[in-house]
Amino acid sequence: MEHMRTLKPLFTIPQHWKPIRCIRARYCSNLANSGVTSKERRTTVDKFKSQVSSGPSFQDFIRGVSVKKTYAADGDCSDHQSYLSEDLELGKSRKVYFETYGCQMNVNDTDIAWSILQGKGYLRTVDLSEADVVLLVTCSIREKAEETIWNRLQQLTVMKKRRLKTQTPMKIGILGCMAERLKTELLEREKLVDVLAGPDAYRDLPRLLTVADGGQQASNVLLSLEETYADIMPVHRAPQGYSAFVSIMRGCDNMCSYCIVPFTRGRERSRPVGSILEEVRMLSDQGVKEVTLLGQNVNSYRDTSEEQFCSPDLTQLSRGFKTVYRPKQGGLRFSDLLDRVSRIDPDMRIRFTSPHPKDFPDEVLHLIAERGNICQQIHLPAQSGSSKVLKAMRRGYTREAYLDLVRNVRRIIPGVSLSSDFISGFCGETEDDHLQTLSLIREVGYSVGFLFAYSMRKKTHAFHRLQDDVPAEVKQRRLAECIGVFREEAARVNAALIGSTQLVLVEGESKRSAQDLCGRTDGNIKVIFPKEDVSAQPAESNSAPVNAGDYVLVKILSANSQSLRGRAISHSSLSGTVKHCQLDEHVASDLSRTETCP
């Protein structure tokens, strides 16, 4: 029970259980000398046993277990109450403030946690000063992310101490990966946290907050082999509400030597396809124009919730790739899910992240190429360009296998936009290994990249078996060189789009100028263009303003490593873009293509 901290005084005993008077030890020890007869002694013991047998059992203190009993002294009474009654777990309009750090999975976790608390009567606020509960949804992937949370906790603790003198005490909670990884430190280090909830314990948040209201710390960081929150409909709060994240699976089985995710998020389990499709349909009905399917290893999705999905077929991997685990059998695969999701709304863009390169069999690639609303942008995390380092990372592929996959992707999906992850300074990385990474970046030519210096995490294979032997200054120098080469190649890739016409989903005003709008292409490249009325449809003279959530065709006029600049031509749609391309092919340069053309 080290992960579940609760208070005995908060146990509520139903009224039909009569209190038993405490019998002090000295009374029992002197019973033989008190003149009490044997018959009276038996009567007293029998009465005590009767009272104990009619009282609560161990089952009565397990939340959610229904135990039917009849108590003769109090008439008929069925189904006990949870030791924390439903009334105690109600939020009673207390205000919750969320801060979300890290990946898109944490954004989705925030939506799930809020959905659960909202159902219990909590209110959400965006004003920290009026919050009764502050919940930080945290990330443990790198040391810097955790340092950010520790610093934030210090700031919140100061605010909490001020609140004690004036208003209702503020409660501070840590949710997500950091709660699981650092549970002991978070609860004991300077008493900064009231509530801890791991990624699989969000259903328990109302109870944990109730325990914390009693003045004690409360924690549940147990990992689950089954929890997918399939029956929880997240409360989506994406900017302007035109894009949303939909979680399709949780956990990871890959066990890369540097990665903490399997230890903070647990083993892979996939959400039933029916609940995913229901959520996507709901988002479509709400006018959402872009859905991103989420998972730690999103393209290893495998729904085995229904018997009809359980075939003897083994999961197919990308050619030349392998895993640390045995091939998995049966289940509805990622290509099946992607096919079904993309059919719901032809005018809704579908993206997915974060995939593993091993899970790109040809059937997935052909579906992306053929289906107009599945974005032709693929994230292929390489992590290193050296086969030796990739082996130490336990990635399951070589440099050559990765490059073969890139060539296969581009053969099946011409014009595809690629992005990647890279780690600089992993255990044992030499200067030659680093140069191989630079050459891989140049050879592939990515549009978007996520690059970091290696940060060793406890519990990982690398922590137990490898030595973090690359000096910090060398890591930073190599990281800077990787970023420099990455930007050079991204600038070259983006420059090839100058003169083309791109279909852009508008996100809103540019952060740098209220006179400009910004959005993203099918390839997930940011486009900035002037805010001005454009024709309602291609080849039409009447104009209409451009708003967030609109699809517009933008002629690209300039580019740099991070974004494109252009001018909007007209409103459009996913279904109408192909026709436009056929009519106006002359607007595109020979070096590029309109991204949504097949």
Image: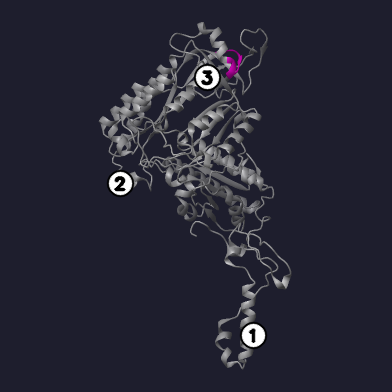
Q: Considering the numbered disc 2 on the image, is that residue within a helix, a strand or a loop?
A: helix
Q: Which residue was labeled with disc 1?
A: 43
Label drawn at residue 527: 3
Return the residue found at the far right: 75
Q: Considering the numbered disc 1 on the image, is that residue within a helix, a strand or a loop?
A: helix
Return the residue found at the far top: 586
Q: Residue at x 61, y 87 (%)?
A: 41
Q: Residue at x 54, y 7 (%)?
A: 584
Q: Nearer the viewer, mark 1 or mark 3?
A: 1
**Picture coordinates of residue 555, whole percent (x, y):** 53, 12
Amino acid on which the number 1 mark rests in the picture: Thr
Q: Nearer the viewer, residue 102 or 242?
A: 242
Q: Is residue 237 visible?
A: no
Q: Is residue 425 visible?
A: yes
Amino acid on which the number 2 mark rests in the picture: Arg
Q: Nearer the viewer, residue 204 or 140?
A: 204
Amino acid on which the number 3 mark rests in the picture: Val
Label drawn at residue 465: 2
CA separation, marks 2 and 3?
45 Å
CA separation, marks 1 and 2?
67 Å
Magenta segment:
567-576
Find out whether residue 595 is within the magenta segment: no
Q: How many circles with numbers are drawn on the protein?
A: 3
Q: Are marks 1 and 2 in contact (CB under 8 Å)?
A: no
**Picture coordinates of residue 245, whole percent (x, y):** 55, 33
- Determine the main secondary structure of the stretch shown in magenta: strand
Residue 409 quadrant = top left
